[in-house]
Each structure stands twice: as C-alpha cells, then as structure tokens.
Amino acid sequence: MLQRPQPRLIALALLGVSACSSDLDLTGGFADPGYEVAQGEAPPTLEERLLFCEENKPSACPNSDDSRMTRHGGLIDGAICQFELADQQQWASKGANIDRLGQHLPVVGVADLLKDLDHQGVVVANDHPELARLERLDRAYGWDAFDHQDKTWMPQGISGAADAAADERIAGRSVIAVSWYHNAKASGLGDRHEVARISFVDVTDPADIRYTHVVLADVVDEGGARPDLRPVRIHAGGIAWVGRYLYVADTTRGLRVFDTARIFALDSQDDAFGYDPDTDRYRAYGHRYALPQVGAYFLTDQSCWHRFSFVAADHTSSPPSLVTGEFRDDDIAGKLMRWDLDGDRLAATGPGPGITHPSQVFHAQESDMQGAVSVNGAWYISSSGQDGAWGRLYRADRGAPSVASGWVIGPEDVMFSRRDQRLWSLSEFAGRRYIFAVGLANE
C-alpha cells in the first residue's frame, strides 16, 4: 500500500477538498483535486492524487446514468483511481516469436514499406459537397475507386508521422496511418469478423498520393517447427503511433501494441491466413504485409469499466500521453481518459508491477463520440449524428459549455499535427469516405 507523506496530506486538506457532497461530480463520482491548487502550493503529484482518490472515491463505478448531466455542458471530473490498465508483459515472449518468424520471412520497417505502395489515392477538392460543412478545411484526400466503395472494410482510426516522430516525418515522408476492420455482415465471410488492417498513406506529394494495406497479426508458437500467424480480431476504432509502436484500441479490453519496426513481407497473397505447409508460404487474406502485435495493456479485474472506442496521442501534454474515450449513443456519460507515457510505453503508477492509472478522467457530456484528442489541455471531440446524418466537432473544457463546429457524415478518429497546427480526421461510410485536415476550432 502506498503511504502518503504527512506534509502533503495537510497540503491537500488546504485545497478545501473533502468527501462531502460538494466535491462529488454529477455522476456521483469523486471530483479529482489535482488541478484546484492554492496559490503558492505545488500541484499534488499523481501518486498523491491517487492516494487521495482512494480515500474519497465513490463506492460504485460510474454507469450510464446521465440524468444529472447537461448535454454539451463541458467536461466533468471523474475518479482516476477507479481505472487501471495492466501491462500484459508480452514484450519478451512475442518479441521472441517475431524474431523466430523473421528467420522465415523478410522483415521491413515503415521506411522500406513506403517504397512499395501499391494503391493510388486521390486529392479531393475543398468544395466537395461531402466536405461542405467543414470549417477551416485545409486539405482532403481520398482512396482509390475500389476502397472508396468497398463495404466489407470500414476505416476507423487515424494517426501518422505527426504522432510517431518529433519532426513529423518517417524517412523524410509525411505519412498518415488509418485502421480498418473487416465487416463480416457485409462480406458474409464470418471467418474474417473484425480482422483489422492498417493503411500507410504517403501524402508528401499531393500530386501522387500512394498507400498500401498491412494486416494486423499475432505471431504464435504452437509447438511446431516454426511460428504461425493468426489474425487479430478487433474493431480498431482508434490508433496512436508512438515511436516504433502503434497502439490500437481493443474495445472491450484496453490497448494492443504493434511493432512498426518489424513488419513481415509475406510470400503469398492467397485468400487464407497463416502458414500453408503444402506451399511452405504464409498468407494473410491477400495482404502483402503483416504488422505483428508485441504487447498489450488490458483493464484489470479491479478496474471499473471503460470502453476503448478510440485512442490518440497528445504530445502537447507534460509528460506526453495517450487519450482514450468511449462511444455511447444512448447517453452522454461517456468517459475520456489520459494515460501518461514514459518514453514510448505507458508510465507505470503502481502499486503492482506494470499497473497504470489515468492521470485524468472526464465525463464528456457528449453522445456518439467517435474520436477525441487533447491539444494544450483543450479537448476536440469528433461526434457522429449530431445534426441529422452530419456529425459535429466539439471543443470541450472543464467548467464551460462545449463549442460546436461543422463536421462530416460518418466521422471517426482524430489526430493533431503540431507542425501544421491541424486536426486530421476521416469518414467511414462506403462512397463517402475521406481523409481531411482542418484548423483548430477557436484558434
């Protein structure tokens, strides 16, 4: 059990925060005191805030009851000690399997992958009717004719070199990454239910947009002479590319981590998955490349529930962090969370090994959240279906109503580019799916 330093106990008391009803948020959750600091007082550390939260947290987990909330009313604090992720300690075992498979297949990094892009994207005019409600639209791109119309794969998450590298470039290139899941209801191929892939899109030259699809895979050792490949079945509703690692939202469990420095070039494009002993080749449902999972962070049994509908990187926070959030279409009690990074992995907070608590928890008081990113403390929330079929982009803060901007039909995840001071997002529906960049709301 962590022990609170006695002087800081007094300091926190001086903040005027107690367990009385005035310190409970509208959901019955504890209003975290970490940002209500008396003048001249040092802010409490995350450890101190967690200890204080443990002593004052509500007896029940937050639920979907939004009867005391106000739609578009801004962010409401929640209890950071009610949620925790555990590092599944897969790095060594999965890394060893990846290395073993590398004895049988070529291994490439993203820089090499960018030399072998087999799809041609398009530039979309700013006056395109599907983009008509976007305010401060900067640029937009589209997929090739097949991917634009294909109902069997649905784009979801967005990240890219803007998240992965300090100069926002990979091998000197400007790169966008987009996650997709396979829609088995549309294809009728139940064996591919929510198989996921990543598109790496080179947008350096607007006159020559190119990309390729890379399937997400797990390298498994089943006691055979060689490792095998298995599909990763997740909705992949959001992604965040940090250094070499691509974090992918696993809706019901947490975050999975994939290694962009070790991508397998497959030796067969047959429509199957895994090793084929008859041909001595590896397949991945026609994909030419496979991106292997190397780690995972999952909710613990002690944690309250949080749906990981999306994830994004925030390099404007100190320390840099990942933010996650949850889609809810029947209420406005969906949560947003911040998870601090230590380098390119989540920062451990304890008390157990590999345990991470969020440094912030908010109830967004918005419905249908499809993605969110934090920029210098302000949150930008991509929400669908807020104006008929059209979505809205909300700028949300603590203690103030959110501010809406025009958005697209079928909006999804969000990424922020510090270099361009632009939000990147995308739309998902077949026949009306685009990647686009806009200026910050209220900039």
Image (cartoon, helix red, strand yellow):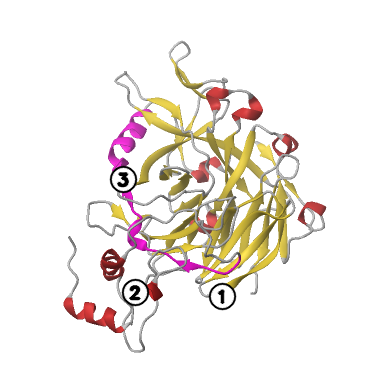
Q: Range of the magenta residues?
A: 72-101
Disc 2 marks which residue?
20
| Residue 177 position within the rendered picture, expressed as x and y whole percent measured from the top left | 57, 48
* Marked residue nearer the N-terminal end (3 or 1): 3
From the image, tell me which residue sits under label 3: 301
Q: Name the residue: 54% across, 33% down.
A: 194
Magenta stretch contains residue 350: no
Residue 117, can we see it? Answer: no
- Point out the residue furthest to the bottom here: 40
Distance of label 3 from label 1 (alpha carbons): 34 Å
Percent x, y for residue 50?
29, 65
- Gap in angstroms between the C-alphas marked 2 and 1: 23 Å
The N terminus - image quarter: bottom left
The question of residue 85 being in magenta is answered with yes
Q: Is residue 413 left or right of residue 433?
A: left
Give the residue type that dot 2 points to: Cys
Give the residue drawn at x 60%, y 68%: 395
Of labels 2 and 1, earlier in sequence is: 2
Q: Which residue sits at x=47%, y=46%?
A: 249
Tell me if label 3 and label 2 are in contact, CB under 8 Å: no
Q: Can residue 238 be seen in this view?
A: yes
